[in-house]
């Protein structure tokens, strides 16, 4: 008990010392200097209104437009799905056409090569006359695009067809 | 040389192969036709959606015109 009393006394002494150490600042209210500006008497600004006699129709139109926009955004999702499906089908079509091309070539090979003999001999002759390709030529040849390859194949077929006529 | 009108003879084994290839070709042509049909359907679907967009845009434009007139041609 005595120890507690001592602590309380010490606390009070400390508080007194602190109070003495910290200067007390007094806050005074400084009156505002009178403004030099001319204070006009309060004027109420006139407000104008425009009458909308078909306000319900206007509101209906706005709401309907919003609704249509939302429908369009929903259909955007649908259209992108359709497009994805379409591209998938186009790829499928391309694959089938490639298979058809392979089968046609197979059929062509399966048929007896009666008329082609002469053409083959000619082709061999021209092949022998050709100079050997350099490395750069080989590289450039390998980079021929699929489209160019198809173009080449087409011209070969056209040549064969013209020989048949 | 094969002259026009002259028959070409194919070995029986090869003939069977040729028939098989022709069958396969016919199947593939059918498949290609089916895929193309689907592409046509999808294209039609896509176009109808785009037509819908066009109609919506026309409607919104007309509504906006109405709102514009209502706002700028007030009655007193």
Image: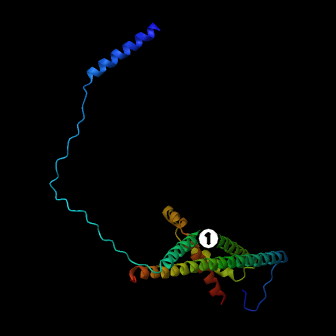
Q: Residue at x 19, y 46 (%)?
A: A32
Q: Tell me the quadrant of the picture where the C terminus of chain B can be found.
A: bottom left
Q: Quadrant of residue B16?
A: bottom right
Element marked by disc 1? helix
Q: Which residue is mark 1?
A: A78
**Residue B29: quadrant of the picture:** bottom right
Q: Residue at x 79, y 77 (%)?
A: B23
- The one nearer the camera, B63 or B53, is B63
Compared across the picture, whether A126 is left or right of A110 comes to: left
Whether residue A128 can be seen here: no
Q: Nearer the viewer, residue B53 or A145?
A: B53
Residue A37 in the image, given as x and y percentages of width and height: 16, 57
Q: Residues within 10 Å of mark 1 (few under 14, many from 20)?
A: some
How is the protein colored in the picture?
Answer: rainbow
- The image shows residue A92, relative to residue B74, as above or below, that is above
Q: Residue at x 20, y 43 (%)?
A: A31
Q: Position of residue A26 (x, y in %)?
A: 24, 32
Percent from the top left, x then y, of residue A41?
22, 62
* Total numbered circles: 1
Residue A94 is drawn in which quadrant? bottom right
- In depth, the one of A21 and A97 nearer the eye is A21
Looking at the image, residue A145 sits to the left or right of residue A8; the answer is right
Furthest toward the right, the residue is B12
Locate residue A154 relative to residue B31 in the image: left or right. left
Q: Position of residue A75 (x, y in %)?
A: 59, 72
Quadrant location of the N terminus of chain B in the rendered image? bottom right
Query: Quick one: A39 or A95, which is closer to the camera?
Result: A39
């Amino acid at each position: 008990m005595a120890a507690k009393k001592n602590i309380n006394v010490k606390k009070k002494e400390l508080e007194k010392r602190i109070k003495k150490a910290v200067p007390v600042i007094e806050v005074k209210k400084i009156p505002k200097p009178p403004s030099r500006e001319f204070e006009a008497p309060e004027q109420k600004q006139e407000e104008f209104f425009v009458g909308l006699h078909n306000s319900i129709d206007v509101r209906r139109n706005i709401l309907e437009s919003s609704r249509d926009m939302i429908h369009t955004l929903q259909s955007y999702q649908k259209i992108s799905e359709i497009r994805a499906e379409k591209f998938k089908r186009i790829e499928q079509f391309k694959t089938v056409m490639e298979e058809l091309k392979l089968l046609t070539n197979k059929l062509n090979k399966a048929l007896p090569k009666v008329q082609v003999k002469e053409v083959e001999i000619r082709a061999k002759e021209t092949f022998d006359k050709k100079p050997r390709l350099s490395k750069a030529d080989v590289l450039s040849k390998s980079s021929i695009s699929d489209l160019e390859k198809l173009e080449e194949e087409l011209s070969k077929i056209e040549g064969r067809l013209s020989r048949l006529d | 040389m094969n002259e026009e009108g002259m028959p070409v003879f194919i070995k029986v084994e090869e003939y069977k192969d040729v028939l098989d290839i022709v069958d396969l070709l016919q199947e593939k042509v059918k498949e290609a036709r089916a895929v193309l049909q689907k592409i046509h359907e999808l294209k039609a679907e896509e176009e109808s959606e785009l037509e819908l967009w066009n109609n919506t845009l026309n409607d919104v434009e007309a509504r906006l015109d109405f709102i514009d007139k209502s706002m700028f041609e007030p009655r007193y």
